[in-house]
Image: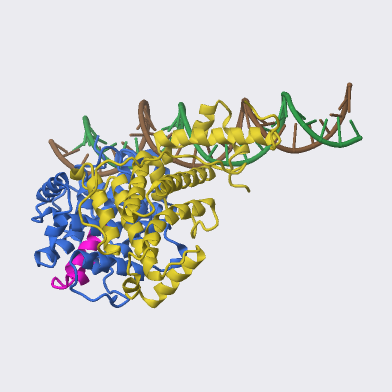
Chain colours: A yellow, B blue, C green, D brown
Amino acid sequence: MAAVSSPVPRRERLRRATLDEIKQTAHAQLAELGPAALSLRGVARAMGMAPSALYRYVDSREVLLAELTADGFASLADALEAAFTAGDPHDHLGRWLDVARAHRHWALDHAVEYTLIFGTRVPEGGFVGTRVAAELQRSVTVLFRCMTEAIEAGLVDTGHVEAGLTPTMQVRLRAWAGDHGVAIDPGGMAVCLAAWTQLHGFLSLESFGHLPPALEDPADLFDRQMIDVFTQACRAIVPASPPGADDPTRPDRTVGSGPARMGGR
Amino acid sequence: MAAVSSPVPRRERLRRATLDEIKQTAHAQLAELGPAALSLRGVARAMGMAPSALYRYVDSREVLLAELTADGFASLADALEAAFTAGDPHDHLGRWLDVARAHRHWALDHAVEYTLIFGTRVPEGGFVGTRVAAELQRSVTVLFRCMTEAIEAGLVDTGHVEAGLTPTMQVRLRAWAGDHGVAIDPGGMAVCLAAWTQLHGFLSLESFGHLPPALEDPADLFDRQMIDVFTQACRAIVPASPPGADDPTRPDRTVGSGPARMGGR
DNA sequence: ACGCAAAGTTGACAGCGTTCACCCCGAGAT
DNA sequence: ATCTCGGGGTGAACGCTGTCAACTTTGCGT
């Protein structure tokens, strides 16, 4: 069963094991009590150790929460990537809808993580350089690839969109695309951002309970909006009738392993 | 200065006064420390009274936070209504843009309130009947009126939108419109919801720092998206060049007064 | 002037994040 | 084989929090 000899020196292995257990326990507490009620003492209690012992692994409660936030972003990114790679590369609209639905289902299934990652202001002047930024970037990259590949396939007239942007916005969008190795003109970037904005707005309102309760299950409306935002970007392609109701594309979340300590001081 | 005789029996007046002071002090603490750091003891300390005395006016910390949340929604609704009534009733696109910008400026100027009201999951199965619901409804009503009045002016072909909705969604949208006294068909409601979704998505991402930092000041992009969501609803009307940069429409917040006690038990 | 309810205070309890001083034990060096 | 040393873990403590119960003060209405 076990490997004959491990490349990591046992000491480190045990350390990682308990750190994983800490994160796992914290995740459980988070899921049933909400972010505000997560307590280090509670985690320690559940693990059967003294509260102060946690500080050998975690610098503070805030750092632990940040780590869980990053895990949440990573989980979402995994779900989106799975939906993307499982989709048909030639059916751009269908794949976009798959990814969008995967995003929605992740949001509904992981309610507390969703509020943690999308209902919290970023701490101080952006989290540039942190793991959170990288994981968020991964999600955005998937969403954008749905559109950029459609653009590259010639489905969108980005020129007429670009014409509607101010010059400063054009250079910023171009610079940002260049930073992330995307060869798409500013008009295409604007299209991607509009799609993301619409997607996030819907999920945020639905997840936080701000949508009118009379709508009950707004899955139809979500599909409609996602189809519209796509077809309005690339005019035409497809008639305006919604596809089948249920989708087989609902991946599970996976949790990545982090460094040996959180928030190194 | 003072009125000769007050209709409220002085006792009640004093009570309301200190309750207002509590809310005001709590608001101040909220604004500089964030929702998580607001403490009843801190408020009591700032007011120079014993912590337990607050319980004569507030049932719990949570109730106080809920009250501040409702105030936040009310403040936003006031801002939107002010922008709406100040706008030109014949320039539907311009007025929509005014209201959207007012929303954005409110979000940026009232950062902590924004996270409090739009970054928090609604407690339990919707806040139907609470003051929060009413104030949120006020905001939504203003946003929707921008679109519905344009629809009534004949600028939108809602029929072709309605055709893209599932039957169940149509009846739900119709029922919801009926509940709020809006005489707009389901297609029009879907248009309104799409606009709201897009608006909220942008502001949520921007306020919480999830937009790419390279965009710096995304005011241009916001305008562009708001114009697009309008013109794509009512195709045509207006060429695709963004209007002037600065807007005179930036109302201040106002705070409404509540009942004599919070969270009556 | 009296009584009574409301307003406010003191004190306590439980729980929280965090730190400090100490112990224990496995691993590496002598 | 012994000594040392550092990382894992414990227990107690500090200061903070929300909240409650008992007590005191205050001021209005009769």
In terms of depth relative to the viewer, which is nearer, A215 or B120?
Answer: A215
In terms of depth relative to the viewer, which is nearer, B56 or A229?
Answer: A229
In percent of the image, x 58 and y 27: which residue is there? A49
In terms of depth relative to the viewer, which is nearer, B89 or D14?
Answer: B89
Query: Is B80 covered by the magenta stretch?
Result: yes
Query: Is A40 covered by the magenta stretch?
Result: no
Is residue D27 found left or right of C11 in the rendered image?
A: left
Is residue B115 found left or right of C3 in the rendered image?
A: right
In percent of the image, x 19 and y 42: which residue is there? B129
Is residue A176 found left or right of B100 in the rendered image?
A: right
In percent of the image, x 40 and y 40: which residue is there? A251
Where is A181 relative to B175, above or below?
below
Q: Main secondary structure of the magenta part?
A: helix
Where is A148 relative to C25, above or below?
below
Magenta range: B75-96
* Residue B169 seen by the camera: yes
In terms of depth relative to the viewer, which is nearer, B161 or A137?
Answer: B161
* Residue B42 seen by the camera: no
Q: Position of residue C26 (x, y in %)?
A: 74, 27
Where is B72 relative to A185, above or below?
above
